[in-house]
Amino acid sequence: MERGDLLSVNAKIFEGQGQAIEAHADRNVKVCVVGNPANTNCLIAMQNAPSIPKENFTAMTRLDQNRAAERLKVPVADIKNVIIWGNHSSTQYPDINHGFVENFPSKHLRTTVKSAVNDDEWVKGVFLKKVQDRGAEIIQARGLSSAASAANACLDHVRDWILGTKPGEWVSMAVPSDGSYGVPRGLIYSFPVTCSAGNYRIVHGLPIDKFSREKMDATAKELLQEKELALGK
């Protein structure tokens, strides 16, 4: 099924889910949308539950963050602050520019991900494409989505949201845009966030280079198109 078909079908489903949340859920409910297209499904559910705080709605890009870490060929737990920007789709932008690796090149040392990889051409080519297309590759190979990996990523997402991130570290979550980094308000867009006491906060002030800006704008454009297709506005 094409992504546009999913949007049409799931719009009705997530409209109903949002209405059910509005009618029956606690006002402090925390929502993590995993079903694709996750960002826009989250937006639909959020708009159909107007009495629930918008910041209580998120979509999951943690699976993409974990996949990005795996592609760098070091333990996932040792890679910090790699960012997934934008949509949970083939336009997502895995950004290693602010990341670092613990216990590399040896135990108790730390280095930047860029230094550890030391190959910009690979990062902007092979790595970027592999992370963007990994979900489709799995479906093509297995005939099924990576449900177990997604479930584990959802646990990571909710654990950090509720229990908090460590000082100096952030994670990727698709959340309602507040206009940060020039992302249009009204989109559910993946940003780097820190979490504390059941709340998240978008990390502000990160330097964005020209390549990153282009990728971030491209995935925002796709989300605007999805929003228009799903909501007609």
Image (spheres, rainbow, N blue to C red):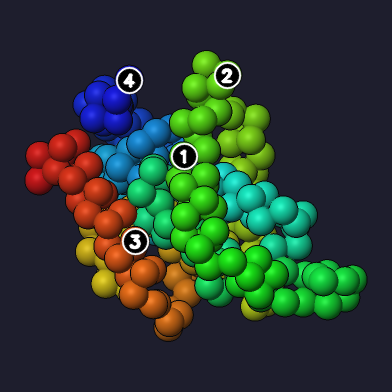
Q: Secondary structure at mark 3?
A: helix
Mark 4 → mark 3, Cα distance in angstroms: 25 Å
Q: Secondary structure at mark 2?
A: helix
Q: Residue furthest left?
A: 233
Per the rendering, the mark at residue 142 is 2
N-terminal of the pair, mark 1 or mark 2, is 1
16, above or below 182, in the image: above
Q: Residue at x 77, y 77 (%)?
A: 110
Q: Residue at x 34, y 61 (%)?
A: 215
Residue 204 lies, in percent from the top left, at 43, 79
Q: Amino acid at mark 1?
A: Asp
Q: Residue at x 65, y 66 (%)?
A: 117
Residue picked out by circle 1: 133
The number of callouts visible is 4
Mark 2 → mark 4, Cα distance in angstroms: 16 Å
Q: Is residue 50 left or right of residue 69?
A: left
Q: Amino acid at mark 2?
A: Arg
Mark 4 → mark 1, Cα distance in angstroms: 16 Å
